[in-house]
Image: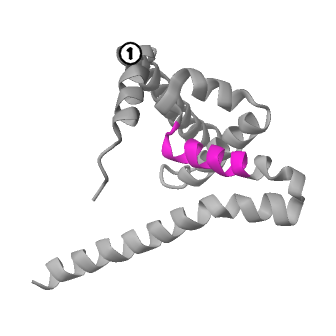
Amino acid sequence: MAKPALPEARAYQALARTREIPRPIGLNVVRAFVVGGMISVLGQMLMWMYENFFGFTEKGANNPTVATLVFLSVLLTGLGVYDRIAQWAGAGTIVPITGFANTMASSALDAKAEGYVLGVGANMFKVAGPVIVFGTVAAFVVALVKTIFTVL
């Protein structure tokens, strides 16, 4: 149970709320929608390109599309462009594939001074580890639920 705030803390919080710059929520939503949509359209265009120009099937075009989106996200993160786009677009850049690649590349770049193995390699997987574990556990739970409902 949280302790009630002291009167000084409550007074400070009230003062901070009066000085807080209002956020343009509507504009932020539109920006996130537009940028997230543009990333998704880029993915769809890549998939179409792999199908039509390189002869992939619809199912087979998924892997190179994902790889290309991850590559572009990591490249733009390394060049500092992805962060500027994310600053402007907010949550629109957290499309699962590109957002995850950006997060891994950012954490790896932050630790570059510690060396490539202990810095980049170790810190990159601090982010990936929990995501992979969650994905594995979630897949197990979904498969278990499906199995239970199939048997019944």
23 above or below 36? above
Q: Is residue 82 left or right of residue 37?
A: right
95 or 47, which lies in front?
A: 95
The residue that disc 1 covers is 18
Q: Which quarter shows the N terminus?
A: bottom left
- Residue appearing at x 35%, y 15% in the figure: 26
Residue 28, quarter of the rendered image: top left
142 or 62, which lies in front?
A: 142
Residue 10, quarter of the rendered image: top left
99 in magenta: yes
- Residue appearing at x 52%, y 23% in the figure: 89
Where in the figure is residue 126, as x and y percent of width and height? 65, 63
Q: Which residues are magenta?
A: 94-107
The residue under label 1 is which amino acid type?
Answer: Thr
Mark 1: few/some/many CA within 10 Å (<14, 14-19, 20+): few
Where in the figure is residue 67, as x and y percent of width and height? 65, 50
Where in the figure is residue 19, as x and y percent of width and height? 44, 15
108 or 8, which lies in front?
A: 8
Mark 1: which secondary structure? helix
Q: Which quarter shows the C terminus?
A: bottom left
Residue 102 visible in the picture: yes
128 or 139, which lies in front?
A: 128
Q: Residue furthest bottom?
A: 151
122 above or below 54? below
- Residue appearing at x 60%, y 36% in the figure: 49
